[in-house]
Structure formats: structure tokens, C-alpha cells
Amino acid sequence: MKVKLWGTRGSVPSPGPETIRYGGNTSCVGVTLSDGSLLALDAGTGIRNLGLSLPDKPSRLHILLTHLHLDHIQGLVFFAPCFRPQTEIVIWGPASPEASLRDRIARYISAPLSPIEVRELPCDVSFRHTPESEWEIGPARIRAASVAHRGPTLGYRIEDGADSLAYIPDHEPALGADLDALEDEWISGFGLAQGASMLIHDGQYADAEYPDHLGWGHSSLSHALSFARRTDVGRTVLFHHDPLHSDEQLDRLSEEARERWVADGGASEEIELGAEGAELDVRAPAPSSAVAG
Amino acid sequence: MSTASQKPLELILARNLMSALSTPAFLVDEGGLLVFYNEAAGVLLGKQWEALGTVGPEEWGSLFGPFDQNGEPLPYDDLPLVRAVRDDRPAHAEFEIRSTDGEQHRVEASAFPIQTAHGSRGAIAVFWPVAANGAGA
């Protein structure tokens, strides 16, 4: 299993000379499965470039949405396969007691926010609420579960052979909780991430910034590190960068993350900040790579 | 997938909220198993949650009561938390409980089910101590 980070930014697109290296596009990750098929995780503005990279031929694509905040769906109407009649697109997302997934997405893909309506999309698009139990797409076994964020929000675990990817881009597991003191079963997202080969996780705030954003649905660096350590993942990619963070600030955050991870007994190559355009192998961790604690 | 079981998010968030309250509060899962109570409830009962551990429905009744105004044990099925889980609707009652030091406390209890897109996940109950004159303490 391989992933490509097409958008790593959180909240709002942040293009500009100060965000060139980590990128300004919002959440989107392409996952290439062992049979060569593709899953898209979220449809932030990064999905526009993902769409442009795909060949113009009949295909079936699955898009797994964590939630419907704009930074996770804004790229949908600029996703080239949506405008190809020979393409079938299945969009998965969280259920809500208020309205169907289709109707909630249609609030964005409709006037006055969009020049087109969902029914006008040339592709064959369908919308599905994620089931409670595991399901399969091609060779992948997929599980979705609610995680701590504002509004109905999912995290995903994707397993393909021995490799496993946990994707929890918007997550505040430490809201009202001490991650270091809680039992495993009481930690939001634990069951999705436990022992995963790779974890892509919210790391939006520096520790000093978190108190001013308590309850906004995102993690501080300390929380992200604690979550990764508790879940014993093989490799952690911090994601959903704050739109106010420049490349230089993210470099400093990356350095701090590595230093603290190593100080806790991990290896420096086990943690990094996600950079737009990065292509990463998702491989089952070797037994010796587990972090104590 | 071979990952450990995890409590539903709704129970996790309920526990986090309850932990920040000074009102005694109790949490049961969809099977009626008591899975948490907060520090204020621990003060009322005379025993903190960490010292008690997981307690099944019948054990709960024998540990702390509850009793009616005549000192008779209340039927388990009549407890608000049990009714909230069983009937999927809010429930309210007034009764007495016995703390570990033997002292009895009169309380009002309100319970409501925790409903999700995938059905009920359990129930939460808050206890409100009642003063001797009947007013809320």
C-alpha cells in the first residue's frame, strides 16, 4: 500500500511563497492498494491535483470522507473524474440524524456556492453512509469509527495484506481527558490506530497555541505524540497543518516532534510532518520498531 | 481486523464531560453495565470509581441500595438508568442510596439514553441530593 499526500493543510487553503514546501492545499490523501486501485481520503482542494493525475478512461473511484467541513470537501467540484460520464464515483461519509450524506454535500454543490448541482455531475456518483462493521473495497478491508471532533466525524483504518493505515486528520482525543492516564478503550480513535503500520493524524497546533483553541476539534503536538505512542503505530505523519503556519514554523515543529519522539524512545524516522506531494510506503512495522510506553 | 475493543465515542465524550462536572453522574453501556461514575458520585457513595472497577447491574444494586422511603430495596428494573436503557426513553425517580460508611442519602435521579446514528449506546444519569426538607441540596 502506498499513499500520496495531495493536500496536508487544515481549515482553509493557504497558498503562497511561505507554504510552498508543506503545501497549501487542504486534506486529501491518495491510497494505492496492492491491486493498483485507488482510494481517495477526503476531498479537500488537494483532490483537484489528484484528479488531474488520473487517466481519462472508464474507472470506479471511492472517496472516503471523514466529515463535511469545507476543507474536506471543497475540491469535489474541481475533481476532473466528476465530469467524465464513464466514471463511477462512490462517496462514503458519516451518517447524521439531520439529513442524508447526499443532501448535506449538496448544500455545497448547489447555488449560490456552486455553479452546478449534484444531479448535474456527468459522472455516475453515489453516496453511502459508512457501515458500523468492516467492509471491503478491492483488496482492502476498511473500518470507520466516530472520533472526537466537532460534528459527525470519522477516522478510517485501511488494511491491505499485512499493511495498515489509520487516517484521523481531524481529532481532539485529549478534550477533557488526560491521554497518558486513560485506559486504552477510553481513548477516542484508539481502536482505529492501534498497531497500524502508518498513522496520519491531526497535528494542527503547537502546544502553546492549543489553550486558545480548546474544543476546536484538533490536537496539539503533545497530544498527537501521546496518541501515537499509546497506539503503538509504526510511523506517524502529522497532518492538517494550521493555515497560519509557514514552512519555517513547520520545520521547527517537525524538529521538536522528532526530538521528543526520540527522547521517548522512538526512532527519528518514525515521525514526520506531512508535506504536499510526498509519496510514502505503508509497511507493516518490524517488531523492533515499536515505541516503549 | 485484530484491534482492541474501544468504547463508542459517545460514551467516551460523556465520560469526559462527566469528569468535569461536580454533579454526581453515572454512565452505563448499552448492556446496562456501569462503566463509569465521576468524582462527585464517588464522594456521594464513599468510594471512588478507580477503587471500584466495573460493576454489573445486580452488584450495583447490592453495593449502594437503592431503597425506597421505607428502607425496602427498590426493584432493579425500576431504577432510572435501567429504565432508560431498556425503554429507550428518559426516566426519573427519587430514592435513597447507602454510602460505604453506612450513611444514607436521599437523591433524585434523572437518566436519559445515549442515542446515536447506530442506535442506543447506553445511558447517563445525574443524581441530585435532596435535603432533609425535600429541597434540592
Image (spheres, grey):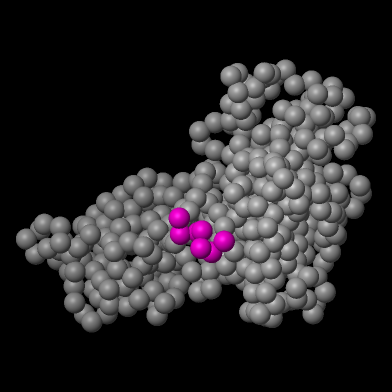
Let me know if residue B8 appears in the view: no
Question: Relative to A2, is B65 above or below?
Answer: below
Residue A13 location, quadrant: top right
The location of residue A34, given as percent across then percent down, is: 90, 53
Q: Nearer the viewer, residue A190 or A47?
A: A47
Residue sitting at 34 percent across and 57 percent down?
B125
Let me know if residue A197 appears in the view: yes
Q: Does the magenta stretch include residue A211?
A: yes
Stretch in magenta: A206-212
Residue sitting at 67 percent across and 74 percent down?
A259
Q: Which of A167 and A13 is in front in this view?
A: A13
Q: Which of B50 and A281 is in front in this view?
A: A281
Q: Does the magenta stretch include residue B117?
A: no
The location of residue A149, given as percent across then percent down, is: 54, 50
Question: Relative to A6, is A113 above or below?
Answer: above
Q: Residue furthest left?
A: B133
Q: In this view, does A52 lie to the left or right of B122?
A: right
Residue sitting at 39 percent across and 74 percent down?
B49
Residue sitting at 70 percent across and 77 percent down?
A262
Q: Which residue lies furthest to the front in this view?
A: A17
Quadrant placement of the N terminus of chain B? bottom right
Quadrant placement of the C terminus of chain B? bottom left
The location of residue A188, given as percent across then percent down, is: 56, 60
Residue B37 location, quadrant: bottom left
Label tally = 0
Q: Which of A277 and A233 is in front in this view?
A: A277
The location of residue A59, given as percent across then percent down, is: 88, 33
